[in-house]
Image: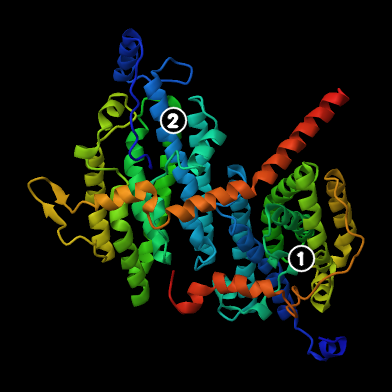
């Protein structure tokens, strides 16, 4: 997931070309890197895919927070494998974005100086072990909800990346659910951890789908271009409908007293997240924004000598090879 | 402990010696796997994040099998998790090298390289262990470790032969960690019992091959091996770990200690 609040770029291209481009999209064709595309389409996608990639990278931090405290060897191994998958997702999403004419290093710099965003969810802390379960169950669950339709997105490299990502994310979600199920069925303290995790992560998970449709001004163009497939509210409703029975099965209470099944609509009615909080987090005032960005900046800065050293060696090696020929 | 005090201890049974050997193997991979996992999300470049997680994962996977077998042979109804999460520092049998802190990326990779070079040689020998279970673990693990060695050696070469700064950092890492190499080749009555039973080689016999392996890579990395062969020791016997191990265990074992008996 993880593309929130992506502003569609205005486009000032040749109307004929634009019409032909739109016709291809309407016909369900995939746009490939060498094809002509409107500048707005290209820029919007860079921002969307880049934000998704950044989310995978920053998302390592809240989970990494518990790798060293995982309670069993098996849980530690599963979490390591998951975080490794996510770094891998980051890698091929960056590659997909690079096909649009931007480098990974440029995107990294933009993340580090705040010009590009990552999903708001990773600005919330993971405070107990059940959070690791809740991240898999809710956060990956919400991500999948968003990504499954994106497998059909119009941009070929993005669509193919999503197909691969979705397979692994479904696996992560099942693992997350297994962690929280074990705790919900466990000792009173474990059950308390599970409920605490759900209490803290429920609304931030709902926020992952972005603002309410009535406030989401950029959706129309992106939907026309098929780089956004459903509205925010549609996906959020689908997520709630899917998740409520799972919480009931676990014996956990969703922290929303007004949550109830609406027979007429065939959906659950639920309370919206606090959108002021959402915009605060987007602006940088979430509980972990400063720490997350500081950690990524430190990793990048501390790693400079490593990247320089590797590059210098590669050049020396190439020069030696050249001299020997 | 003095030599006289050591001798005064009753001789270990074959079973006890075997358990100690298995703990040595499993604790090495556990502690190093844990250390490497501390890097999660903080590596210098995305590919390194992936590689470090991958290596930590391999090592934790190997730990599950080594400690699982140790628990079986011990026959006290314990699990691999009991051994990993409920022993105190003095019962750990890992080399001091693997409990050393990560330091910078260079120190982490140098530690990995110095360990991988030994680990690969050891597992190669263990493939022909008289104990089929040990041979089977070695067969599986040696494939993973061959990759670990290839990667850590390549990285040590790149950074040793990179910029002046990367060279200096790698030399500093080598100087710092070299005193912890010798412990890998020390031999005691447990090793003698293992050798006699054909379960594992006498560690002293691995030194020549190790020196060749390591010096080839370090020469290419333009790094200088310190002359002193002084060896810090006490990890694999459990007689004296570093101060670092206790902190690592505090973090690793916290949930199991705070909520005894809970199933996770």
Secondary structure of the residue carrying tag 1 is loop
Is A221 located above or below residue A174 in the figure? above
- Determine whether A228 is above or below A299 in the image: above
Image depth: mark 2 or mark 1 in front: 2
Residue that numbered label 2 is attached to: A46
Q: Observer-nearest residue: A124 or A192?
A: A124
Q: Do dots 2 and 1 share one subunit?
A: no
Q: Nearer the viewer, residue B198 or A205?
A: A205
Chain letter for the residue marked with disc 2 in the picture = A
Chain of residue at mark 1: B
Q: Residue sitting at 47 percent across and 40 percent down?
A: A53
Say whether residue A187 is visible: no
Quadrant showing the C terminus of chain B: bottom left
Q: Residue at x 25, y 37 (%)?
A: A216
Badge number at residue B130: 1
Q: Is residue A80 above or below residue A119?
A: below
Please tell me which residue is depicted at 76% across the width and 61% down the height of the picture. Answer: B126
Front one among B188 and A272: A272
> Residue A30, how many percent across, how many down?
39, 21
A10 or B49, nearer to the observer = A10
Q: Residue furthest left?
A: A264
Q: Regarding mark 2 in the picture, which secondary structure is present there?
A: helix
User: Would you say residue A217 is visible in this rendering?
Assistant: yes
The alpha-carbon separation of the residues under discs 2 and 1 comes to 58 Å
Q: Is residue A158 left or right of residue A233?
A: right
Residue A216 appears left or right of B45: left
Residue B186: percent from left, percent from top: 84, 71
Q: Residue at x 54, y 34 (%)?
A: A106
């Amino acid at each position: 997931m993880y593309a929130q609040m992506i502003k569609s770029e205005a486009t000032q291209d040749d109307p004929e070309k634009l019409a032909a481009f739109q016709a291809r999209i309407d016909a369900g064709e995939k746009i490939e890197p060498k094809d002509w595309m409107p500048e707005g389409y290209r820029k919007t996608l860079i921002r969307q895919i880049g934000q998704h990639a950044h989310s995978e990278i920053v998302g390592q931090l809240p989970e990494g927070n518990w790798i060293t405290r995982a309670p069993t060897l098996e849980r530690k191994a599963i979490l390591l494998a998951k975080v490794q998958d996510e770094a891998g997702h980051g890698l091929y999403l960056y590659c997909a974005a690079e096909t649009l004419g931007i480098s990974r290093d440029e995107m990294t710099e933009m993340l580090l100086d705040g010009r590009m965003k990552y999903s708001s969810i990773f600005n919330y802390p993971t405070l107990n072990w059940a959070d690791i379960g809740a991240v898999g169950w809710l956060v990956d669950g919400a991500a999948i909800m968003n990504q499954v339709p994106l497998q059909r997105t119009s941009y070929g490299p993005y669509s193919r990346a999503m197909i691969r990502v979705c397979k692994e994310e479904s696996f992560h979600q099942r693992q997350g659910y297994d962690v929280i199920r074990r705790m919900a069925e466990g000792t009173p303290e474990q059950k308390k951890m599970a409920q605490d995790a759900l209490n803290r992560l429920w609304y931030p998970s709902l926020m992952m789908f972005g603002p309410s449709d009535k406030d989401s001004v950029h959706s129309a163009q992106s939907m026309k271009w098929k780089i956004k497939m459903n509205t925010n509210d549609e996906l959020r409703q689908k997520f709630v409908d899917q998740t409520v029975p799972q919480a009931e099965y676990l014996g956990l209470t969703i922290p929303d007293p007004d949550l109830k099944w609406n027979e007429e609509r065939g959906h659950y009615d639920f309370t919206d997240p606090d959108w002021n909080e959402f915009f605060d987090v987007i602006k940088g005032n979430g509980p972990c924004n400063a720490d997350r960005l500081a950690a990524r900046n430190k990793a990048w800065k501390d790693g400079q000598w490593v990247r320089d050293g590797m590059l210098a060696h590669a050049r020396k090696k190439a020069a030696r090879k050249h001299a020997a020929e | 402990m003095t030599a006289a005090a050591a001798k005064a201890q009753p001789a270990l049974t074959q079973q006890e010696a075997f358990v100690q050997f298995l703990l040595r193997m499993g604790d090495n991979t556990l502690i190093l796997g844990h250390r490497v996992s501390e890097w999660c999300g903080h590596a210098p470049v995305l590919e390194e994040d992936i590689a470090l997680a991958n290596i930590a994962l391999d090592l934790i996977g190997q730990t599950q099998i080594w400690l699982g077998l140790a628990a079986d042979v011990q026959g006290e109804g314990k699990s691999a998790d009991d051994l990993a999460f409920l022993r105190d520092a003095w019962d750990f049998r890992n080399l001091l090298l693997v409990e050393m802190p990560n330091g910078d990326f260079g120190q982490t990779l140098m530690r990995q390289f110095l360990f991988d070079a030994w680990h690969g040689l050891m597992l190669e020998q263990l493939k022909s262990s008289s104990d089929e279970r040990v041979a089977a673990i070695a067969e599986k693990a040696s494939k993973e470790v061959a990759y670990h060695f290839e990667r850590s050696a390549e990285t040590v070469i790149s950074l040793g032969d990179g910029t002046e700064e990367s060279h200096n950092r790698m030399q500093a890492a080598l100087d710092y960690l070299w005193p912890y190499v010798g412990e890998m080749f020390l031999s005691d009555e447990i090793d003698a019992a293992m050798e006699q039973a054909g379960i594992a080689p006498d560690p002293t016999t691995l030194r020549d091959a190790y020196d060749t392996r390591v010096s080839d890579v370090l020469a290419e990395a333009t790094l200088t091996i310190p002359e002193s062969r002084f060896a810090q020791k006490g990890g694999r016997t459990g007689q004296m770990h570093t101060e670092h191990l206790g902190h690592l265990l505090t973090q690793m074992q916290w949930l199991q200690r705070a909520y005894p008996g809970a199933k996770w």
